[in-house]
Image (spheres, rainbow, N blue to C red):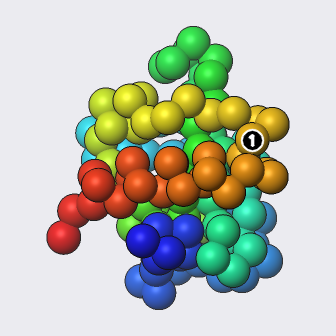
């Protein structure tokens, strides 16, 4: 499951790139915009501001959910549906940085939604 927290080689991600402000697209439509991201080895993620879609909430997406990054269009494509993202464990800004159990819970959820 550790690969859920890393960008795949085919995504087009460049270490150190700034993704803040990029649009995030699920398989079936727009999810929101990147508010924060990390490319830390084994712990890479996106924090997405969902705007009005989920009433201004944020979601945590492990980097392993990213299928492709379009730098020119400033868009990140993820291999999950909007429903899968909406049903994910609620984003907790206090736990996501220091609680390994929280990351494990989120990682397990998204790994179960994996598409081949």
Secondary element type, mark 1: loop
Please tell me which residue is depicted at 47% across the width and 68% down the height of the picture.
Answer: 4
> Which residue has dot 1 on it?
95
Measuring 38% from the left and 30% from the top, which residue is drawn there? 87
Task: Identify the residue at image location x=75%, y=41%.
Answer: 95
Residue 49, located in which quarter of the rendered image?
Answer: top right
Pick the residue in front: 79 or 95. 95
| Image quarter hosting the C terminus | bottom left
Judge from the rendering whether residue 56 lies leftward or rightward of residue 24; answer left or right: right
Task: Name above or below for residue 22 compared with residue 43.
Answer: above
On the image, the x and y values in percent for residue 108 come to 41, 55
Q: Is residue 2 above or below residue 89?
A: below
Q: Quadrant of the N terminus?
A: bottom left
Identify the residue at image location x=41%, y=29%. Answer: 86
Instruction: Report whether 85 appears left or right of 114.
Output: right
Viewer-closest of 107 and 56: 107
Q: Residue 96: horizontal and vertical position, in percent?
A: 72, 46
Residue lying farthest to the front in this orientation: 101
Q: Position of residue 30 (x, y in %)?
A: 43, 36
Q: Residues within 10 Å of mark 1 (few under 14, many from 20)?
A: few
């Amino acid at each position: 499951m550790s690969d859920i927290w890393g960008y795949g080689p085919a995504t087009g991600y460049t270490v150190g790139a700034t993704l803040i402000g990029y649009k995030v697209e699920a398989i079936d439509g727009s999810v929101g915009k990147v508010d924060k991201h990390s490319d830390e080895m084994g712990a890479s993620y996106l924090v997405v501001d969902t705007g009005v879609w989920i009433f201004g909430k944020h979601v945590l997406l492990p980097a392993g959910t990213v299928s492709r990054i379009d730098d020119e269009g400033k868009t990140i494509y993820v291999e999950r549906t909007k429903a899968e993202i909406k049903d994910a464990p609620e984003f907790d800004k206090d736990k996501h940085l220091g609680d390994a159990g929280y990351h494990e819970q989120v990682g397990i959820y998204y790994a179960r939604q994996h598409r081949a």
